[in-house]
Amino acid sequence: MAVLAADATEAFVGVPIAFDGGGSYDPDGTIVAYAFDLGDGARSEGMQATAAHAYASPGAYEVVLRVRDDDGNVSTDRITVTVRAFPSAREPNWKPVVASVFASVLTVVGAWFSRRAPGPAGSRPTLRAFAFTTLPFVVAEAGTGVVSLLTGLLAIPPLVGMGTAVDLGILVAGLAASTYRVRKRTPPR
C-alpha cells in the first residue's frame, strides 16, 4: 500500500519539497521499488523511498507515488503541491529624495547668486533674478521627483540610469544659468 507524504504542500519557486514514501507497506512482503512522478515531467525511481524536487514555475502539481511489492503488485498514492512565485522585492525609488535635495541646492545657490545679480541702473531685483534664472530649474527638478514618485518613471536605482541623468542635467543647467546671469550682469572692476 503506497503512502505518500510531503514536508510541505506549498512552496515558492526554486525551493525544494521533500517527498517521503517510507510509510508505504506490503502486508505480506516488502516494497521493492518506488517511483515518484513529480508532476512537471521530473521523475525519481529506484529503491529510495524519498525524493526532493524544486519546481521552476508556479502552479499546482500532482505528485504520484507508485510502489511495487515483491509479488509484483502496484499501489499508488497522490498529493497535490502548490508552488508560488516569490513576491517581488521592490527596490525603493530614491529619485524623489535626490530630486528634493537637488531642488534645495538649486534654491540655495540660485538665491545666493540672485542677491549678487545687479539690475538696471544699479538696483538689485533679487526676486526677479531668482524667478527667471533659478525657479524654472527648481520646478523642473521637483516635478520630475513627483512624477517618479507617482509613476515609478525615472527611478533611481539604477544609479547610472535615466533618472540620474535627468537630475544631473537639471542641476548642472540650473547652476550654469544662475552663475552665467551673475557674471554677465556684474560690471568689471
Image: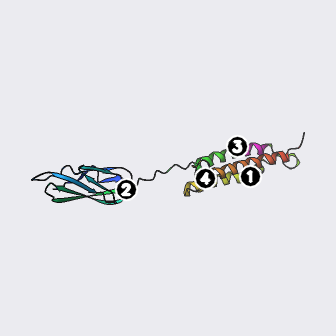
Q: Choose top left, top right, bottom left or bottom right for residue 101.
A: top right
Where does label 4 land, which residue? 145
Q: Nearer the viewer, mark 4 or mark 2?
A: 2
Extreme left residue here? 28
Q: Which of marks 3 and 2 is nearer the N terminus?
A: 2
Indicate the position of residue 142 as horizontal and vertical percent values. Answer: 64, 52
Q: Does the magenta stretch include residue 112?
A: yes
Residue 118 visible, this orientation: no
Q: Give the range drawn in magenta.
A: 109-115
**Do the residues under discs 3 and 1 have CB atoms within 8 angstroms?**
no
Picture coordinates of residue 39, whole percent (x, y): 31, 60
Classify mark 2: helix, strand or loop: strand
> What residue would you read off at disc 1?
131
Q: Which mark is residue 92?
A: none
Q: Which amino acid does label 4 sit on?
A: Gly
Q: In the rendering, which numbered label is found on residue 108?
A: 3
Q: Nearer the viewer, mark 3 or mark 2?
A: 2
* Disc 1 secondary structure class: helix
Name the quadrant of the C terminus: top right
Between residue 135 and residue 27, name the one nearer to us. 27
- The amino acid type, in three-letter code, at marker 2 is Arg
